[in-house]
Image: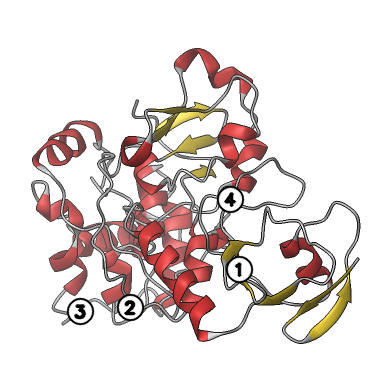
Amino acid sequence: MRITINNRQIETLEGETLLEAARREGISIPSICYAKGAKHISSCMVCAVKNCQNGQIIPSCTTLPTEGMCIDTESEEVQRVRTLSLELLLSDHRADCEAPCVLVCPKGLDIERMLGYYDEGDLGRAYSVLSEAFDLPTLGCDGCKAPCEKVCRRGTVDKGVEIRAIIRSIVEKAPKEMAGTDSDVRPDKQGFISKLGRFSAEEKAYLKENVKGASRCLHCACGGRSKCLLRACATGAGIKRSRYDATSNMPAGHKIHVVGNLWFEPAKCVRCGLCVYNTENGFTFRNRGFGMEVLIPEENKNNVDEQIARLCPTGALYVKAHERKED
């Protein structure tokens, strides 16, 4: 079957969608709710294209081509629809892509990762993270006004993390040989950065009661940020800040242990449905419309495999080896 995309004629294969045909021909179309080989429905409209024959904006991830179809993927109209769709998704996504303390550190120290090792009692790896930013044993915090402590989200719950004191403790007590770290995820200050917003009174009470690690750090940075399609698409669209405030009513910071090393953060979920449609007696929807949410019933958890995290486009589902159980 022959169709035209951006004034270029291509032959489509039987059963493939417009999105699949375009990508096979090297034509880039972003998407959130689509994953190759996975069951899905069109729910995000980030993959929107225009049917030039009737002027309709259609989702390319579920639309099958017809003979002679003429498609536009590049016009300003199409880009506006995609940007609007992304901003609406972002309004349903309450998360910090990067920890605020990391973003403001003048030395570029990955504070959140360092505190993660500190909370696990692994001072060797915490020391190794410090060595990435400082010429140890000399500390780069001397004379610093500690913007990291001023923006610490824990400070909005009760009292901020005493980051400088913890750094001094690590330098004094840690073995001085480099232990190496087991993460290749590093802060990205150049791309789109989602921001959580304010905690509600209920969220503050929950976090105060449930987050009690050695450092008391909330570990704000998203565990799935390195593979987050929502962030990648927002960056590609040039979105710096969504026009819409986050409206999700899911509790921020609430982490649900699913099975093994698989974790679920409902506040980051944009309800694309990939985890629902690709697990049997696993994740499910509750309610409809704006009140719809994704949940994992306790009795269904053992039916879920960690590999489902690969389908999640927002980091709401992620695999992390050393997450502390809270639910």
Question: What residue did someone put label 1 on?
Answer: 30
Q: Quadrant of residue 74?
A: bottom right
Q: Verify CB contact (< 8 Å) between mark 2 and mark 1.
A: no
Which residue in the structure is indicated by mark 2? Answer: 138
Q: Judge left or right: residue 144 versus residue 86.
A: left
Q: Is residue 178 in view?
A: no
Q: Which one is closest to the eye, mark 2 or mark 3? A: 3
- The residue tagged 4 is 42
Left or right of 219? Residue 316 is right
Q: Position of residue 121 (x, y in %)?
A: 39, 43
| Residue 170 visible, this orientation | yes
* Nearest to the observer: residue 136 or residue 228: 228
* Distance from the alpha carbon under mark 2 to that under mark 3: 9 Å
Q: Nearer the viewer, mark 4 or mark 1?
A: 4
Mark 1 is on which residue type? Answer: Pro
Q: Quadrant of the C terminus?
A: top left
What is the three-letter code of the residue carrying label 4?
Ser
> Residue at position x 31%, y 70% from top?
242
Using the numbered discs, state the Cα–Cα distance from disc 3 to disc 1 in whole angstroms. Answer: 45 Å
Measure the alpha-carbon separation of dots 2 and 4: 54 Å
Instruction: Assess whether mark 1 and mark 3 are in contact (beta carbons under 8 angstroms).
Output: no
Q: Residue at the location (34% across, 64% down)? A: 111
Q: Nearer the viewer, mark 2 or mark 1?
A: 1
